[in-house]
Amino acid sequence: MSARIKVLCVLLAGVALLAAGCSSGKKQKDQSPATTAQATAPAAGPLQVTVSTTARGPEQGFDAGKAAKQVSPDIQKFVSRYLTVAFLEPAQARSGYKDLLAMFDTPVRASATKQLDSLSLGSAGTQVKAVRPGKASARAVVLFAGGHPTAATVNISFDGTADAEQGSGPLRLRSVFQLLRAQSGWRIAAYDSNTGGQN
Amino acid sequence: MAATTPRRRALLIVGALVLVTALASSLALTVGSRSTAHAQNAVTIQRAHSGKAAPNLKGRITFLVIGSDSGAPKFGRGGTAAGGRADSIHLVVLDTAKHRGVSIGFPRDSYVPIPGHGTDKINAAMSSGGPPLLISTIERLTGIHVDYYALTSFDGLTDLVNKVGGVTVGVDMNLVDSFSGANFRKGIQKLNGGQALAYSRARHGTPQGDLTRSKHQGQVLLGGLKTFQQQVASDPTQVMKWLAVMHDEVQVNLPFTETLRLALYATTISPGRINNLVAPGVPGSAGAASVVRLQPAAFSLFSRVRNGAFG
């Protein structure tokens, strides 16, 4: 056997091995669709929330533009935190969404506990393995009193994709939150929230 | 290739075939994976849900709504609102659990005991000791504890109404009063600030003078609540507008967080579930002064409200 024939044989063996490996993978895929879902799911991108803020304040001596610019990062931080614990951390479902409920003002927390499905992944969270955030935006009107932000109305829109054992599916949140500024930060004092459904 | 032997040619052909087979297998797997992924996007993980909630406040909340005759430069009235006479006095009691309430108007000439100041017209209580003395007077008179007060002036009321774009009020009679500037036809209508003030002040040409005026003031109050609810229902950001206007035009003695919770709670209570009443009284005199003497029916009303009956 010449050297060229030896090289050819080695190449053929390599190709044969590659083909065998592919066949083995196919068998695995048929047995476990979840493995395939994980393998084919694109890596989750970071959550990016677009925030548009308007400020309201006293008639005299209030610079609405400056105030809006000042408070906008704070609102963005709140909305990002909310969407993270409500949707991007499916493990929250197993803890009863404690971190999420802590974002609600006490007089509305009992209602939120009963309506988690309209505010978060809710009961679906237990079957979700990962969430890929899509478009996220918020429009806020913030009230200033005494030079500080004291309350806000925030319209939140979020779309994403959830990956679960049985496959992937769209997520959707459309909410209006009335926020009050407590010592510990923004708290949701009232809400009107919808999840799922059509865009 | 001229030197290629038949054995070598056969090997090359076999090699090419294996390569093509391997490539085809890989391609089939890739397509299969994509098909699977596409099918997975069709599953429903999140079903449609709707939820809505306002603050679930506990128990009974009472507040005194006061309109002062002072602290209104636009109407040529100096001093401060808190140092003036209370021309409009309404005790609003809300049963938060049952989402109902009552507004009791007190005719400004009601002749009542004022703690530490003998007996006088009720509107003198505030000029003698500010809102705290008026609250003490009302509490002693009715036996009902007052949690908070809200105080405004002629300027405050007119500015407030104008800034929120007017309030819708069910005017209950044709009314012309040159003293207050009132000129209304009966029916539901949107009043601007000046009209709301005129309707609240008119007593000449009304069937029961001071008592009718107090009832009309309650109608403006409930009209404001209805207008607030309508605006917030169509645009939730209007809550911030109303709070900003209230902050500018109304003095309150409660922390802002409580004001916000109350405002949000107010979106849930139907104005029709708040009974607009006036403490029953009859015209009389005390020396040279014209006064209103509260009748036993007034004290029965206070007793019923104390016991949770708002009818």
Image (cartoon, coloured by chain):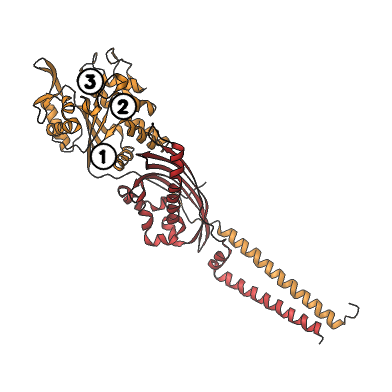
Chain colours: A red, B orange
Tell which of B146 and B224 is nearer to you: B146
In this rendering, the answer to whether B66 lies above or below A113 is: above
Residue at mark 1 to residue at mark 3: CA–CA distance: 30 Å
What is the chain letter for disc 3? B
Residue wearing tag 3: B212
What is the chain letter for disc 1? B
- Estimate the x, y position of residue B298 in percent, counting from the top left: 14, 28
Circle nearer the N terminus (1, 3): 3
Type of amino acid at the residue the image marks with label 2: Gly
- Residue B156 is labelled as 2
In this rendering, the answer to whether A121 lies above or below B241 is: below
Circle nearer the N terminus (2, 3): 2
Q: Does residue A150 appear anywhere in the picture? A: no
Q: Residues within 10 Å of mark 3 (few under 14, many from 20)?
A: many
- Estimate the x, y position of residue B213 in percent, counting from the top left: 23, 21
Residue at mark 2 to residue at mark 3: CA–CA distance: 22 Å
- Estimate the x, y position of residue A41 in percent, counting from the top left: 56, 62
Q: Does residue B63 appear anywhere in the picture? A: yes
Q: Residues within 10 Å of mark 2 (few under 14, many from 20)?
A: many
**Residue at disc 2, secondary structure:** helix
- Estimate the x, y position of residue B35 in percent, counting from the top left: 62, 61
Type of amino acid at the residue the image marks with label 3: Thr
Residue at mark 1 to residue at mark 2: CA–CA distance: 18 Å
Q: Residue at x 37, y 40 (%)?
A: A147
In this rendering, the answer to whether B165 lies above or below A1 is: above
Tell which of A133 and B257 is nearer to you: B257
Image quadrant assignment for residue B106: top left
Considering every residue shown, the one lying at the far front of the view is: A61
Type of amino acid at the residue the image marks with label 1: Leu
